Amino acid sequence: QGTLSVGFGTNSQGTVTVDDSTANAAILVLGENGTGSLNVKNGGVVNAALAAAGNQKDGTGHIDVTDAGSQLNVGSYGLYVNTDGSGTVSVENGGVISSAGQVSFGDGSTVASGSTGTLTLGQNGTLEVGGTDGIVANEGGNGSYQFNMAGGTLKDVGSDLTTSVNATLVSGTNSTVDTNGLNTTLSGVLSGDGSLTKVSDGTLTLTNANTYAGTTSVTAGTLQLGNGGTAGNIATTTAIHDNGTLAVDRSDAITIGQVIDGTGNLNQIGTGTTTLTGTNTYTGATTI
């Protein structure tokens, strides 16, 4: 296994499609100095120790994984949505991207001015990643990134996932965080008009002032607001469907004004004060 580079030369263009077959590479680069694309579909599988889109400052890379059974499996060297150039990575329609290393937007101070990295978890697509800073924004002072949760699933695998990247919950979609029996902490801002569902055992902790306007659902495990400090909430316009456990761990005062329904529990575990002002109908236990 060696390096597969698509779009290597300046102004070059190239596309690799893996359709109902398997491809292996030690290093996979889409857009070294030109434009390179990888399409994985119809149950195709690509295995690489490292995958990168938009490698050099003039490079542009695209990765798309779609259809049931289609997979991009990346090893411990991780997945770069973009490095010094611009890149897009998307997964949808039953496709899976799994990374044993970090998922990174950019590779630091060498990112070219105006470069962008865009990661989209589309409808029924899954990104599997875990670990401390499992998803990281490293665009330096020159680049920018966009993380779109558009009806797909962010699944915690291997070890507890933490990330401080911001994400947009796309309007008209319901995105999922699957804690998979582990603990996931999202400390970036979740914005947009989409909805969020937390599934599986384990705890999803939100530690920022989130502004997304869709509904919030807990089907299993715990959704925790805050981690002992003064931040961590969801917008008051967001309906809460609690069929697991909703926990509040704040050291200050927080008001939850929306209606909480479902069969789940509410746990006040912080040192602060939680005030409920909605006409709540949840039927589980309330624990302080």
Image (spheres, rainbow, N blue to C red):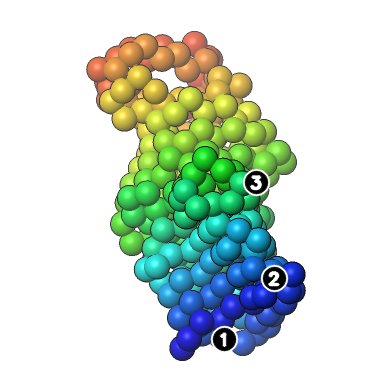
Label 3 SS: loop
Which one is earlier in the sequence, the residue at label 3 or at label 1?
Answer: 1
Q: Look at 60% across and 74% down and name the residue there.
A: 70
Q: Is residue 192 visible?
A: yes
Viewer-nearest residue: 146 or 155: 146
Query: For this view, does 27 lie left or right of residue 252?
Result: right
Q: Secondary structure at mark 1?
A: strand
Horizontal side of 58 relative to 229 (left or right) equals: right
Amino acid type for the residue under numbered disc 3: Gly
Q: Nearer the viewer, mark 2 or mark 3?
A: 2
Q: Are marks 2 and 1 in contact (CB under 8 Å)?
A: no
4 vs 229: above or below: below
Task: Give whichever of discs 2 and 1 has the lower sequence position.
Answer: 2
The x, y position of residue 25, in whole percent, is: 50, 83
Which residue is pictured at 71% across the width and 39% down the height? 171
Residues tagged 3 and 1 counted as in contact (Cβ below 8 A):
no
Q: Residues within 10 Å of mark 3 (few under 14, many from 20)?
A: few
What residue is shown with label 1? 22
Q: Secondary structure at mark 2?
A: loop
**Mark 1: amino acid:** Thr
Which of 96/267 is in front? 96
Inter-mark Cα distance, 3 to 1: 35 Å
| Residue of label 3 | 114
Q: Please give the residue where the numbered disc 2 appears in the rendered image.
A: 10
- The image shows a total of numbered marks equal to 3
Q: Position of residue 23 (x, y in %)?
A: 56, 85
Q: Of 57 and 186, which appears nearest the observer?
A: 57
Determine whether, in the image, residue 120 is placed left or right of residue 232.
right
Q: Residue at x 48, y 25 (%)?
A: 209
Label placed on residue 72: none
